Each structure stands twice: as C-alpha cells, then as structure tokens.
Image (cartoon, rainbow, N blue to C red):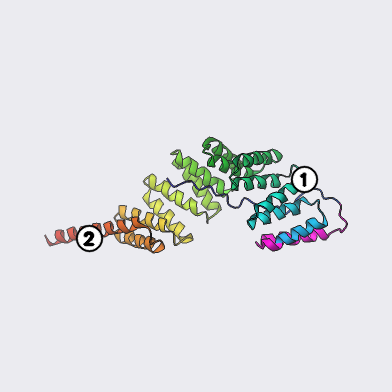
Amino acid sequence: MRPLKLIVIGLLMLTAACSWPHQFDMHPGEAERHYQRGLAFYNKKEYHRALDEYLQATNVRHNYPEAWLGSGLCYARIQNPVGAEDAFKQVLNYSPEYPEAIYNLGILYFEQKKADLAIAHLKRAIEASDAYPRAYYAFGVVHERRNQEEEAEAAYRKALALNPDLSEAHLNLGRLLQKQQQRNEAIGHYKDAIRINPDALLAYHNLGIAYKDQGLDSLAIETFEAGLVRQPDNAQWHNNLGVLYQKNTRFDEALGAYHKSIEADSTLLKPILISRCCMITRAAIHRRSSDTSRS
C-alpha cells in the first residue's frame, strides 16, 4: 500500500459573487472597481497584482469582507501565512459567520499542522453553512491525517452527497475503501475521480493497483497506459506495466516498459533487476522453443 498522501489541493477558493452587506463608503464605486480588478488578476493567477487591488479596495472601504477574503487568498498563494491569517480574521471582524473565511482559516491551520484549530474552524464553517461540500472534504482530510478513518469516511460521503462531482473526495474515499478491502466500491470512486478530473493522476495509480490486486490484469494495464498519456515520465507506472506485461508473457513489451522506467528514473534498481530477469526468461523460452523445433 502506498503511503497516504493527504495534500489539500485547490481548497482555497474565491467566491466571485457574495451577498454580504457593505458599509457606505465615501467614494462610491471605487472600492468595487479595485475589487473587480483584483478578482480578474486572481483568476489569471497574478496574485501579487490581485493582492494590491484588494488592499486598495480595503483602504477605500475598510468594512469590505470580500476584499479582505481575496487578500487572504492571495497571501496564502504567495506563501505568506501571517498575512493570510490576519486578512481572514479581518473578514470575521465584520462578518463573524462568513463561512469562506472560517473555512480558509481552518485550511491554513491544517497546513500549519494545528489540527485542533483546523477541526474547530472547519466545524464552525459547517455550522455557518451546512451545504458546504469542501468543508466536509477538508474535515475528512484532517480526520484521515489523524488516523480517524471512520470519521473521515463519513465526512467524504457527506461532501459527495452535497457535491457528487468533487473529484478529490472520490479519490480519498476510494483510498479508504481500498484499505478496507472494499475494492469494488473503491474502483467505482476512482473511476468517478478520473471522469470528473482526467488529470487526477493519483486516481490512475490507485485504480491500476486495485485492478491488479483483483487479478484484472488487462484493466490494470489499460489504466496505467491511460495514466501515462497524462504523465509519460512516471517511472513507477512504467515499472508496473513491465510487471504486468511480464506476468502475461508479453516479454518484449515488458522490456520496453522497464527501459522506459529506468530512463524516467535511473535511480530505480527494481526495474533494472526485473528487466534482467525478464531477458533471461525470454531467452530461456526462445531456447526451449528452438530445441523443440529441432527435435
């Protein structure tokens, strides 16, 4: 079983439209113009320029939760957790039940390995807005990190009940089910993860392993081959293909896969050793075949 990888990817989200009330400002429209420019830069991943616009918006209208939220997300993107925490807290100064700010504080604390604070904020985000699938997903990630698998599974299932197209939740739930030997259901979730996000690389790996463990070699081969279309230099997948090809006496393809694995990562000793065994086996089969034909 591969070690658990619980990286929270893409959890920091910016909501473009918010319904929170604004306090009247002395320059009608100016703060909003800065905010909209910040949003445009953020969506183009120009986080420093976006941050400058958001901060200008808060200078014009200090009570502007959306702009403070945008500032916090930009600080998080540019690896400034202190600035992010301060900005998210500013949101809560003006809108104490703003779920996105509470949620992102939870994510921030999770990344800082402050699990208790992370859980407290994620619970609070769920209380502020029960229909918040990503909060449940993140809640599951924190529980899984703490080896609380029953709680993690329940959180992932709740996230998917709210949003069946949450690829990360399918992936993580599938991994939990695979650990519990519930491979058929795990396979279904991995396939959903790939259907929703064809670039969910870990889903290809886990799905291929699940098929291999069930003896479904042809499906495992198809899965690793499909993954390699997305990531051609994945040495582990080439090695896995080599093992499967070799098991099914497809020796030429096995050798090719092992060689690609070595090319992708020359430090891997396993494919080197296996490829030598494969060459010996292939030579022995050819020798026996030649001896049989002569006799």
Q: Depth check: 85 or 253 in front?
A: 85
Dot 2 amino acid type: Ala
Q: Position of residue 255 (x, y in %)?
A: 32, 61
Q: Position of residue 236 (x, y in %)?
A: 41, 56
- Kindly indicate whether the residue at mark 1 contacts the one at mark 2 (C-beta within 8 angstroms): no
Percent coordinates x, y for residue 77 in the rendering = 64, 56
Which residue is pictured at 39% across the width and 58% down the height?
Answer: 238
* Mark 1 residue crowding within 10 angstroms, few (<14) / some (14–19) / many (20+): few
Q: CA distance from mark 2 to mark 1?
A: 74 Å
- Please, is residue 138 above or below residue 236 in the view? above
Question: Which residue is farthest top?
Answer: 150
Residue at disc 2, secondary structure? helix
In this rendered view, identify the residue nearer to me: 139 or 197: 139
Residue at image location 47% in from the left, 60% down from the top: 231
What type is the residue that disc 1 sits on?
Asn
Q: Quadrant of residue 242?
A: bottom left
Q: Quadrant of the C terminus?
A: bottom left
Q: How busy is the neighbourhood of tag 2: few (under 14 within 10 Å), some, or many (20 plus)?
A: few
Dominant secondary structure of the magenta stretch? helix
| Residue 45 shown in magenta | yes
Instruction: Tell me if residue 250 can be seen.
Output: no
Looking at the image, residue 139 sits to the left or right of residue 102; the answer is left
- Asked if residue 225 is positioned above or below residue 85 in the image, the reply reads below
The residue that label 1 is drawn on is 93
Is residue 243 toward the left or the right of residue 157 in the image?
A: left
| Residue that extends furthest to the right in the rendered view of this protein | 26
Instruction: From the image, tell me which residue sits under label 2.
Output: 283
Query: Magenta span covers which residues?
Result: 24-49
Q: Residue at x 52, y 56 (%)?
A: 199
